[in-house]
Image: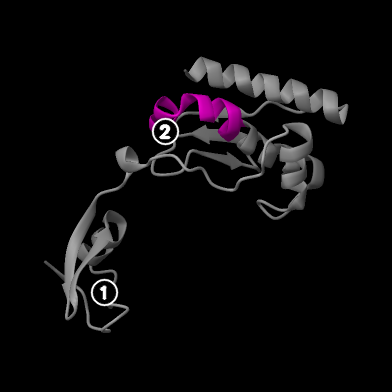
Amino acid sequence: MQQQILERIEDCYQQAEAYFKRAFPRPTTQFTLRGRSAGTAHLQQNRLRFNPVLLRENSEAFLAEVVPHEISHLLCFQIFGKTKPHGREWQSIMLKLFKISPNTTHNFDTQSVKGKDVEYRCACGPIRLGIRRHNKVLRGETRYLCKRCHTHLTLA
């Protein structure tokens, strides 16, 4: 599947070069992204990162939508410089070059990549904290308040 992504990236760049009548440097591509994001574009490094789990579970949508979405970010930066991440320049590339609706997020099922969470308690009941916040509590870096009752959360 990763080879298909690399081929799709090359196809998108050839399409962009024909459309904009200029050459673009090819990005470094990694399949190391974790969490609920499908892909990210690192503009300064000209690098793409993709989530291998979501890729495996949504291969067709990755090829059709995620790859052009992330490439559009890189192209936008190389053509226009710094712009809003999903601003009109990026939207224009998505619509005119790739003829894809400029959606800013995917709608993949993320249950398989959902992070662990830990149950805490407050005066009004149980609250789940993500593992990152839980670890901050364990290290003594912070304490959290319930948004409803304004009491400190304690580990259940």
Q: Residues within 10 Å of mark 1 (few under 14, many from 20)?
A: few
Report the amino acid beneath label 1. Arg
On residue 134, the disc is none
| Visible residue check, residue 19 | yes
In the rendered view, would you say 119 is above or below 9?
A: below
Q: Return the residue at label 2.
A: 54
* Front-most of residues 2 and 137: 2
Q: Earlier in the sequence, mark 1 or mark 2?
A: 2
Residue 47 lies, in percent from the top left, at 60, 34
Q: Percent x, y for residue 116?
A: 25, 49
Residue visible at 72% across and 25% down in the picture:
13
Q: Is residue 56 magenta?
A: yes
Residue 152 highlighted magenta (yes or no):
no
| Residue placed under numbered mark 1 in the picture | 143
Q: Quadrant of the C terminus?
A: bottom left
* Left or right: residue 109 compared with residue 49: left
Whether residue 46 can be seen here: no
Name the residue at 41% across, 44% down.
36
User: Looking at the picture, which amino acid does disc 2 mark?
Assistant: Leu
Q: How many marks?
A: 2
